[in-house]
Amino acid sequence: MIAGVTATDRVSTTGPSRGLGALSPTGRATEPAAWALYDFANTIFSFAVVSTAIGLWATNAGRFGERDGNLVVSIAIALSVGLNALVSPILGAVSDRGGRRLPFLLFFTALCIVPTALIGPSPPLLGLALFTVANFAYQAALIYYDATLKVVSKPETRGRLSGIGVAIGYCGTIFVGLLLILLDVPNEGRFLVAAILFALFAIPIFVVVKERGPVGRVARSDITASWSQLRTSIGHAREVPGLGRFLVGRFFYSDAVNTIIVVMAVVTVYAKGLSEGTAQIVLLGLTVVAVIASFGWGRLVDRWGPKRTLMAVLASWAVGLVLGAVSLSIAGPIGFALFLIAGGILGSGLGGVQVADRVLMVRLAPPERLGELFGLYGLVGKGSQVIGQVLYGVTIYLLLDRFGVFAYQAAVLSLLVTMLIGSWLIRPVSDDWSGSGEFPSDAILVPPERLAPASAD
């Protein structure tokens, strides 16, 4: 038996008591609700700024134009996530030494919000610089946000709460998208709106969630020593069965996921020929699919396990990427319908990847090194985005003038290769409860589905 976790506790979370309080170690619904609301907040930035506004802002003829705009946005993304990739293990390790993660989350959240508010009216180069800072901070904040999942959930309910968080995050996409359409906010004004809403909905996690345990102190020597953390973190990851292989696999499949998030609006407008308003409506419709799918993927994580669920998500993504690339060269209703089907598959997969792979990471990582290894987890995802984003931008830059839409098809299909490599790499990884890094090695664990009838779920 694990201290503080009884068999009765496990059964109750899969039985009739399905409220958020049943997912939390404290029994209070406010903490997991506040945690999930941060997903709502940061997804507003992800959708309104990263996925739509910045690409259309940069490719505007009055700034960089379609060809050069795709390239400079790719460079800005590569710089922001590349720098973040270098410091991710350091940030995670420092948070572990400090004992608390919420202060770091607050700092980087503010560092994202303030520059975002200033992008719209800025000159092209200054606007790109502000976006680079904001995106760096957004990515850094995710290290601490993902790691706080352990604070607000029980081990056997993390898949469900992770799924709820992702689904609520996509509700943030729907909310901001509808708001921007109803208020007819011009593209330049979306940055300020996104910054205000991000700030508003991020407040609850800092007010409600209380981190437990001793409060550590970060000395200057800790910060200096952390610069050598990368090699140490890699060594720690290699000590955990399956973790190193999972992280290498994540490097490859995250390439496609992160690149599609950034370029979907530009592809919809320039490659498929839709207006910005129509593209916004289409993307919102696909987000509804992602919301519904996130709940389903979350339940599958708790029932199947995160590895098996992740494999299913990646298989669906491979199909979606092929259909999406083909649809770009087919005109008329058939091509549009195929484009929507591909978008629905990819939208569902976006939620599924977020739900499954962070739970797999929590399942594999030793609890005393969770922040450190989440930093490494962030590094591989961001490192792949650097490569994927640059490859995409350079492909468009080199092929657009000569081949037109084929340049976008080639860029999308290049992502399929890395997706398949990532799937192959993680296939042997085991996520059995008996090997879970969440508990001491002598703990005896029973998966929730073996403690209650399937109908209780």
Image: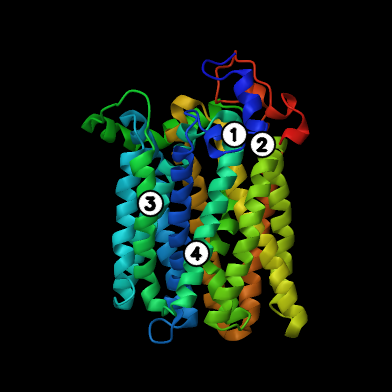
Residue at image point 55% right, 74% down: 280
User: At label 3, which amino acid type do we have?
Assistant: Ala
Q: Is residue 19 left or right of residue 217?
A: right
The quarter of the rendered structure image containing the C terminus is top right
Find disc 1 in the rendering and name its residue. Answer: 157
Disc with the residue nearer the chain's start (3 vs 2): 3
Find disc 4 in the rendering and name its residue. Answer: 175
Q: Is mark 2 on a helix, strand or loop?
A: helix
Vertical side of 320 occupied by 140: above or below: above
Vertical side of 161 occupied by 438: above or below: above
User: At label 2, which amino acid type do we have?
Assistant: Asp
Q: In this view, does 56 lie to the left or right of 295?
A: left
How far across and how far down the image is residue 164, in percent?
Answer: 57, 46
- Whole-angstrom CA distance, mark 3 to mark 1, is 23 Å
Find disc 3 in the rendering and name its residue. Answer: 202
- Whole-angstrom CA distance, mark 1 to mark 4, is 27 Å
